[in-house]
Amino acid sequence: MIHRFFGKGNETTPLTFVAMRTFDIPEAYRSPVIGKVKAIRKLRDPRKRDFAPSLLDFGSVKIVLPRHFGFCFGVENAIEIAYRAVAENPGKRLWLLSQMIHNPEVNADLESQGIGFLMDTEGGVITPFESLRSDDVVIVPAFGTTLELEAKLMEIGVDIQKYNTTCPFVEKVWKRAAQLGQKEYTVVIHGKPTHEETRATFSHSSSSAKSLIVKNMDEAVVLGEFIRGERDWATFEAHFSGRSSEGFRVPEDLERFGVVNQTTMLASDTQAIADHLKLALEHRDGGKADRFASTRDTLCYATLDNQTATTGALAEAQVDIDLAFVVGGYNSSNTSHLVELCQDQMPTWYVRSAEEFEGDGGLGHFNLITGKRESAENWWTVDLPEGKVPTVLLTSGASCPDSAVDRVLQKILERFGGGRAVDDVLRDFAQEQANLENE
């Protein structure tokens, strides 16, 4: 695995990295339209430093694509390893510790390759560990896993390193947490407590540092009130039960700390939580320099780039956007945050695949507010000025293949009808990009 990256950035712009390798992923995950758009952009901007969105004018509808979306480095790495495991182990029993990534299409395809699941996304047992044999192949998902589960598998005799697909940026968070522990800092983890990655990060962090999980800014505000002395520490457990490492003491273990995150959270939320808690420490201690450890370097570049590209597309598109589609698994954390960014500004449809487009014109979608899959009618109806062509923002989470986005794009084009041929639109887009390069 190659961990060399090149890039630059500052406090207000994202650190954009270019991984110096490509991955061997199944052709079924590649796409004839989205793939070509990305390839055209890469010719002019190989290091992805230009965050301007792409605009495809189909005549009857305009499609805006953010500069960054879809499979990230860690996901492509995980998929390559998983399919290699299938190819290298004919006749053996293959298992995924839990979902490879939070995308139903990818997980279903892995199941069709003969891979079973040991646990669900919440950690519930699907296949008892007692049924495993030492010659079974177990694939560790991109989220990583806990030290406790690693020990259980090793006790059985299973080799968990050969096909360990843990994202290198998740591992980077673990290493930073260990460094904080060595310096006697507590680690505050911004993450969803039941998410696989947060459970794994908490396990690794707790092995070397006092650790505490904070779900969101509301909980950070409560924690800040404890730190500033505005709440009685006797009520701490009522707010953070099950979120702290064994033997966690208050207020002693919140004298010095740093904040790391579940890499799929909104980077801006993590930074806001860190800033809020830092101010609480300064209020309590008068700004002593050694009380708060800077951990900005643990933010995942891919998550940050996808989020920045989405907000940039919303703000900088050459035309007003009327509605948005975000494609990805309904249990995908990073995808849900892209939905949040979009739905703050416009009608937004969160769909897991093109199969959500119903034959009668309805649309199945996930409602983040209700937490349920729902069905909508006349989703394409938007209030437009006379003569204006509708404009749709189309993006996807880091665990969603471009092929799935392609199929959603085709459904959108079918609904708006007429318009220009895809090949003509791509040819014009390539010419526009070439003209920009020559300016």
Image (cartoon, rainbow, N blue to C red):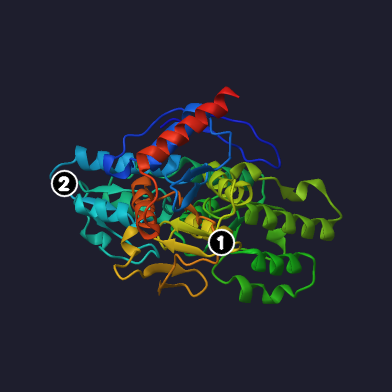
Q: Residue at x 79, y 57 (%)?
A: 279
- Nearer-the-camera pick, 226 or 331: 331
In the image, residue 397 lies at what x, y percent?
46, 52
Q: Residue at x 20, y 46 (%)?
A: 135
Q: Secondary structure at mark 1?
A: loop
> On the image, numbered disc 2 is attached to which residue?
92
Q: Say which amino acid is labelled 2.
A: Lys
**Left or right: 188 with respect to 76?**
right
Q: CA distance from mark 2 to mark 1?
A: 63 Å
Quadrant of the image containing the N terminus: top left
Q: Say which amino acid is labelled 1.
A: Glu
Quadrant of the image containing the C terminus: top right
**Left or right: 410 with respect to 58?**
left
- Residue 162 visible within the image: no
Q: Residues within 10 Å of mark 2 (few under 14, many from 20)?
A: few
> On the image, numbered disc 1 is attached to which residue?
386
- Nearer-the-camera pick, 110 or 260: 110
- Nearer-the-camera pick, 160 or 89: 89
Q: Residue at x 55, y 25 (%)?
A: 437
Note whether 422 is above or below 370 in the view shown.
Answer: above
**Left or right: 234 with respect to 195?**
right
If you read the primary sequence from the N terminus, does the residue marked by circle 2 or circle 1 appear first? 2
Can you name the residue that lies furthest to the left here? 91
In the image, residue 89 lies at what x, y percent?
18, 41
Residues at marks 2 and 1 touching, judged by CB atoms closer than 8 Å: no
- Residue 294 visible within the image: yes
Q: Residues within 10 Å of mark 1 (few under 14, many from 20)?
A: few
